[in-house]
Image: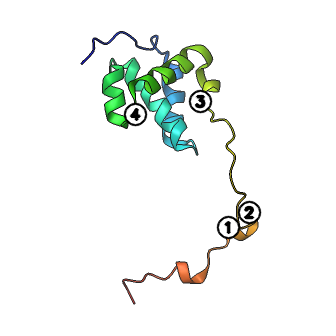
Amino acid sequence: MRTPTKFVTPLTEAQQLRLKEIQKYDSSARTRMRAHAVLLSARGYSIDQIAHIYEQDRDRVSLWLDWWEQYQYDGWADDPRSGRPAILADEEAKKKPARLSINRRAV
């Protein structure tokens, strides 16, 4: 295991609270993961330990910490991804088909 060499700068109380909010409530799983990684780094976890926890490459975790130091909260949003548009319109996606709400084990 390598010697830990990079940690985030100490966090203020307000930053810790905001990061904990992001970790719990953000709609993006990746953003929640990155916020938690910063909190772990502030607690003294090494990059290798965080990489092990999230099963990510240590270079990726290092990049997250760099984003935090450089951009704070603005550095975590993923870039738009290309892909096929959704099949259902937003209104249709909100409607849950009756057949999906049946508990098959109870039948």
Q: Name the disc covering residue 94, or none.
A: 1
Residue drawn at x 75%, y 67% is: 91
Disc 1 to disc 2, C-alpha distance: 7 Å
Residue drawn at x 72%, y 70% is: 92
Mark 3 vs 2, N-terminal side = 3
**Residue 46 percent location from the top left of the image:** 33, 19
Residue positioned most to the bottom: 107
- Disc 1 or disc 3, which is closer to the eye? 3
Q: Are marks 3 and 4 in contact (CB under 8 Å)?
A: no
Q: Which residue is mark 4?
A: 56
**Residue 95 percent location from the top left of the image:** 67, 73
The amino acid beneath tag 3 is: Trp
Q: Which residue is mark 3?
A: 76
Residue drawn at x 32%, y 23% is: 48
Disc 3 to disc 2, C-alpha distance: 25 Å
Q: Name the disc covering residue 90, or none.
A: 2
**Residue 104 percent location from the top left of the image:** 41, 83
Mark 1 vs 3, N-terminal side = 3
The amino acid beneath tag 2 is: Asp
The amino acid beneath tag 4 is: Gln
Going by the image, does 106 lie left or right of 12? left
